[in-house]
Structures are given as C-alpha cells and as structure tokens.
Amino acid sequence: MSSPQPVRGTHDLLPEDFARHAYVQKVARDTAACFGYAEMATPIFEFTEIFARTMGETSDVVSKEMYSFESRGGESMTLRPEYTAGICRAFISNGLQQNVPFKVFAAGPMFRYERPQKGRQRQFHQIDVECIGAPEAKADIEVIAVGASILKKLDVMKNCKLEINTLGDTESRQSYRQALVDYFSDHKATLSEDSLGRLDRNPLRILDSKDKGDRALVEKAPIFTDYLNAFSSDFFAEVLEGLSLLGIEYHLNRRLVRGLDYYTHTAFEFVTDALGAQGAVIAGGRYDGLIETLGGKPTPGIGWAGGIERLAMLVDTPVQPERPVAVIPVGDAAEKVAAKLAYDLRQQGIAIEMAFKGNVGKRMKRANKLNARAAVLIGEDELAGEVCMLRDLDKGEQREVALGQLGAALAELV
C-alpha cells in the first residue's frame, strides 16, 4: 500500500509554514485592531443559498467551484468560499443594525474547487476586513488604509501596488450596463461562448474575460467613468483625495470591475507580480446592496479579503520561533526536580525545552539545534545547595543562580 497523501489542492501546514501563516495573521489582526476592527468568526459552512444569492447563481464560484453537500436533514450546505457573505448574514441574524458602523476582522480557511496552482489551493486561508453601516467615503479610505498598513508592516508593500476604480452608484451602473450591452451586441460574432451568455445576464463580467478575442473587444469597450453621475464622481474624488492625504499611492485601473449588482462605488486590489503572473493579494470593494440581497434592511458596506498563502510567500524575513531555555538534569536524582522546575517556569510564560532522555552531551546538542537562548543545569551538588548553573549560550558565560531566583534571572536574559 502506498503512503497516504493529502487530498489534491490541500497541503499540510508544518511548523515552519504555520509560523509564517501565524505571523501574517498576527500582523493583520494587530493592525486591524489599531483601526478599531474587532475579531470575529462565522461557521465554516452556511446554507448554500447564502453564497448563491450573494455571489450570483451563474458565477463560476457558485456554478463550478463551491463545495456543497446535503445535510442529514436534506438541507443544502456549502463550505464557505469567502468570508463577506457569512459576516453579512451574521450581521442580520444577530440584529446588529443598531451597532453600526460594524467593524470586524476575521481569518480562517476557505474552500473552492479550482485548479491548484502556486499560492492557490482548494483549501486556502484568508484575512478579511469588513465595515458595515458606513456610507461615507471616509470608510472606503479607512478600509483601504488597513490593507496598506498590513502590507507595510509585513514589509511586502514594496512588491505591491494599489489599483482602484469606481463602479458608481446604481444609476451610473445602469447607464454603463446599457452601454456595454449596446457595444458588445454589435460584436456578438466575436464574443466567446461564455461572454455571449453573460451579455444579457451580467455584461460587466465580460470585462473580466480571459479569452483573447474578448480581451481585444474589451480594450475598445466604453469606460465606466464616462457614465458616472455627479454624486459618484464626487464620491470617488473624495476617496482618492483621502488616500493621497495618507500617502497611499494608487493607480487608476478603469477596467477593474465587480460583476454583481450589489457592488457600488469603490473597487480596489493590491496586486503583485513577485509571485509570477500578476495577481491580487488583497481585493475588495463597496457592496451597498449586499445586506438587502440577503433579506436585511438596506445597509451600506465595504471590505476586502487577502490571501494568507500569497502574503506568506511574499514575506522575506524568516519567522523566528521563540528561543527556548533548555533545562538539563545531570544524573537520575535531578530528573524529578528538573521536571518540576521546567513546569513552574512554563507557568511563568518562559518557553522551556526539556528532553525526555539522554546524557548531558546529547541534551546540549539538542538545545543548540533548537537555538536555545540559555541552559539550566542541575546536578547533585546544585540540588544540595538549592541552586542551578545558568549558562548563557550566546555569550558562553555561566553563573550560579538560586532556584528561587531562576525565573527572574531568565526573564532578564530572554
């Protein structure tokens, strides 16, 4: 029998990889908290209709990529492919309409059935920021600033750029939608089969097509900004002015769109080409119609999601685990005392490594392999005097320390 392997599109997060993931999450969590975003979590699966209604029945995610299953009660359930829909559902379910602006951060695994590739798996992980109940352009600026700050603190902003566009309000979007239908209808013979299906249903999604023929048509398609009304133009101008005030550089991308009708105004992506082909590490936008789509009262919102795997791949500096202190008993008599000492030090928050067996030489070799900061040696003589030998492994210095003072001495050292 061959050795067992993980399911295609999944991977094990071994300690070194997990440390990078945890580092990305910690930086993101701490940064979001500085902006007033509290952490929350939603169930890992929801009723299928939550995603079907918010992501569009005909979208690739819903029609091709969702992991859906029937529960024992005969209900259709889906492993979450993204966070926003679940957070908006939670906003409605828990009656949080009076708690606006509802500003939250979340992180966890997502699931999509797609072709595995670098930085993209069938089980992947995201960080997520949502601001619900704030219609002001200031919310757009803040949400983007959270993403920029996280990238800066991870020291990956140097490899990323912010692309931004406006989708206007509902009135502007309808005008633009009609312009696209008129334009692409004149070129039906050239459109791909997928785009022909989108023409009446969701013409904005044609702008995302990867088909070469479609791409050539898209280059000459009408531009959204030509159909913005005054309110939408002023809103976008305020967002751009706010970003400039904060020193956040941006690049206008007039082809950056979101296909679903509940998206309005600001759409943005932090993209990088440091992982090969250009791809987004953070993507988001304003979704003023989403809560209503789920059956709630009309409530504005804006947010983004970022791929932890991709961000972890961009992090240059290796994430160093906490350097432990090695407790090394010398002789059988010291074993039990050393075990109790190690336990007590751990209760004080000090990382302790104590091997289960081996002579002093083997245990010191393991301490060096783990990059231990110090070693505590206890033998018969030390037991008699209720002391230990504290060895600074960086400086190669050693001194005698009373057992009752060891915690304080280690706190200064580590």
Image (tube, rainbow, N blue to C red):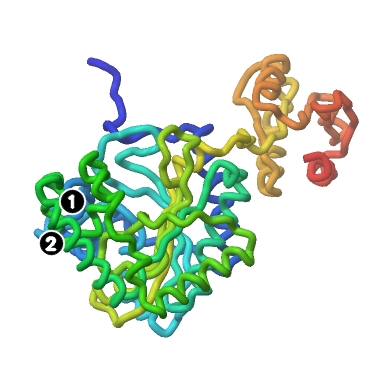
From the viewer's side, name the closer residue of 304 and 137: 137
Could you say where residue 36 lies in the image, as x and y percent from the top left?
Answer: 57, 69
The amino acid marked with disc number 2 is: Asp
The residue sitting at 65% across, 26% down in the picture is 370
Q: Which residue is mark 1?
A: 68
Depth check, mark 1 against mark 2: the one in front is: 2
Provide residue 170's location: percent of width, then percent of height.
29, 75
Residue 87 visible to the viewer: no
Going by the image, does 77 lie left or right of 384? left
Toward which corner of the image does residue 359 lie, by quadrant?
top right
Does 120 appear above or below 172? above
Please tell me which residue is depicted at 45% across the width and 40% down the height of the picture.
310
Q: Is residue 400 left or right of residue 129?
A: right
Secondary structure found at label 1: strand
Number of numbered tags placed on the structure image: 2
For disc 2, the neighbor class at 10 Å (few under 14, some 14 to 19, many from 20) is some
Question: Of residues 227 and 78, which is closer to you in this image?
Answer: 227
Residue at (62%, 44%) from the top-left corner?
155
| Residue visible at 35% across and 67% down in the picture | 226
Residue 284 falls in image quadrant: bottom left
- Looking at the image, which is closer to me, 258 or 338? 258
Distance in Å between CA atoms under marks 1 and 2:
27 Å
Which residue lies most toward the bottom here? 98
Q: Up-down: is 116 above or below 267?
A: above
Q: Quadrant location of the C terminus?
A: top right
Q: Is residue 84 above or below residue 328?
A: below
Say what amino acid the circle numbered 1 marks: Ser
* Mark 1 or mark 2: whose residue is earlier in sequence: 1
Tell me the tag on residue 200: 2
